[in-house]
Image (cartoon, helix red, strand yellow):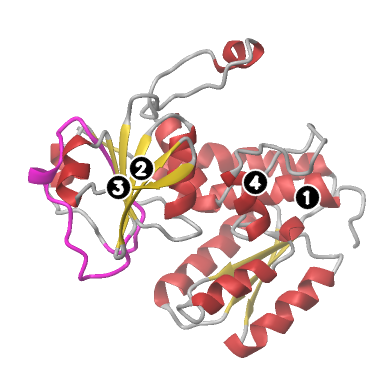
Amino acid sequence: MEIIDPAKIAAKYLEESRSSVEQLGAVPKVVGFIASEDKPSLAYANTTRRVFTEAGFEYELRPIARLALESAIQETNEDASVHGIFIYFPVFHGQEDNYLRNLVDYRKDVEAGSLYWTRKLSANDRLATEGDSGKKALLPCTPLAIVKLLDDSGHYGTKFDKKKLLEAGEQPKPLAGKFVTIFNRSEVIGRPLGVMMSNDGAVVTSIDENGALQFINGLPQETDMTRAQALAKADYVVTGVPNERFERVKKSEIRSESVCVNFSSIENFEPDVAQFVRTFVPRVGPMTVAMCMRNTVRLYQNFHQGTHQQ
């Protein structure tokens, strides 16, 4: 049994981002919009601002009325002194949030949740812009945080010489032969995570309130897999359901060899699961912030280097 502390792993990436900012020779500026009184969102916003600032970024947190957010995003898209935009959701708790997310200019989309980056991920396109191999695409922060947490702790499938495989023209598949069950199919976390892990070779069963889908090689397909069946065979169980009515995952439903990850602000596993399974990750937050910083540096390098305005 192992319980992973995401803050310890995040520390390495925070230091990397701090070093990257120093090497840029300029200070990337991020504007974060908070348009609600949602307590988890407020806590996350204040933590993000603090950590970004400590790492050398300029981070401006702007409280704003939700009906003013649309015009504020558009104005900030046009502001050349701003290199990254962060929005703390939920705002409207519905489709309008997706509309706001997609208003953000992809060149300033810290969370990589807009359609531009979503399409890149779905196509397994690793380049930020076509034909420029020097600019790497961004990945959504929380899915990337989960993958990095598992990889850095030695629990992301099979280890191999990635460089040698790439040189041989082969795509590394660390999760080949693995089964993953994800409770969450949001467009910003659950679905991208399903695509990423299936691109890495896993068969992913993605479950939400509307039923189950299966992702294989990045593509969704229909499935009649039940919750019980999906959990019983899962090597990885990842949950992110922010609802107290969600039926918590019990140890009787899963294998003791499984790796379990909870990224919801609400506990999605019964308390005894952490002591039962091989590896348990109780939260992801610190790593999500670290990946957002990583994305901000990449945005600056890809699209803003040499255009910085003081």
Q: Position of residue 170 (x, y in %)?
A: 58, 16
Element class at badge 2 = loop
Q: Is residue 208 left or right of residue 129?
A: left
On whether residue 67 falls in the magenta region, the answer is no
Query: Within 10 angstroms of label 2, few (less than 14), some, or many (20 or more) residues?
Result: some
Mark nearer the N terminus (1 vs 3): 3
Task: Give the Cα distance between marks 4 and 1.
Answer: 18 Å
State which quadrant residue 35 falls in.
bottom right
Query: Which residue is denoted by mark 1 in the rendering?
Result: 300
Identify which residue is drawn at 17% across, 58% down.
Answer: 248
Residue assigned mark 4: 120
Cα distance between the residues tagged 4 and 2: 30 Å
The amino acid type, in three-letter code, at marker 2 is Asp
Rendering quarter of residue 103? bottom right
Q: Which residue is mark 2?
A: 5
Q: Mark 2 or mark 3: name the one nearer the start of the chain.
A: 2
Residue 53 appearing in the image: no
Which label was assigned to residue 96?
none
- Image quarter for residue 214? top left
Label 1 with label 3: CB-CB less than 8 Å? no
Query: Disc 3 on helix, strand or loop?
Result: loop
Residue tagged by mark 3?
223
Q: Nearer the viewer, residue 234 or 291?
A: 234
Does 157 sit left or right of 172 as displayed?
left
Quarter occupied by the N terminus: top left
Placement of 124 over or under 244, stated as above or below: above
Tell me the magenta residue range: 241-266
